[in-house]
Amino acid sequence: MKEELNKMKAKEHIKTVRVSNKSGIHARTAARIVETVSKSNSQLFIKKNDKEVEASNILSILTLDCPKGTELQLRAVGEDSKELLNRITKILQKGIK
């Protein structure tokens, strides 16, 4: 049991990012985040100040109210957590096209 817990911790990555796309996190951005998470083998949690949400639901993400310049902590847990953080960071910094 302890070995499994250590493996999970090894697959957890945390990154602090600043939302730099001009529209912040709006419905289309939140939808892209949910879509990206659903295609991964990891869970994503987004934290703003003291509020953390699981990024598997568009409405949960939108409740964080994140305009441009907002600092967020991203926490990914799972097999491809590091790659997931990199993909989500690109969405938050460059927006969607």
Image (cartoon, grey):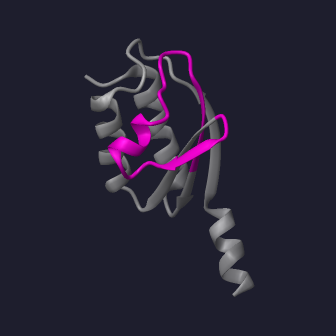
In this rendering, position of residue 6 left or right of residue 83? right
Q: Residue at x 36, y 49 (%)?
A: 57
Where does the magenta region start and end? 49-75
Give yes or no for residue 83 being in the magenta stretch. Answer: no
Quarter occupied by residue 31 = top left
Identify the residue at the far front of this view: 63
On the image, the x and y values in percent for residue 16 come to 64, 34
Q: Quadrant of the C terminus?
A: top left
Q: Quadrant of the N terminus?
A: bottom right
In this rendering, position of residue 42 left or right of residue 17? left
Q: Residue at x 47, y 28 (%)?
A: 65
In this rendering, position of residue 50 left or right of residue 74? right
On the image, the x and y values in percent for residue 25 come to 40, 26
Quarter occupied by residue 62 = top left
Asked if 46 appears above or below 16 in the picture, the reply is below
On the image, the x and y values in percent for residue 4 come to 65, 80
Identify the residue at the far bottom of this view: 1
Give yes or no for residue 73 being in the magenta stretch. Answer: yes
Instruction: Return the residue nearer the eye: 85 or 45.
Output: 45
Q: Residue at x 49, y 51 (%)?
A: 44
Q: Residue at x 48, y 25 (%)?
A: 66
User: Total marks drawn?
Assistant: 0
On the image, the x and y values in percent for residue 95 come to 36, 22
Asked if 15 appears above or below 13 in the picture, the reply is above
Asked if 97 appears above or below 12 in the picture, the reply is above
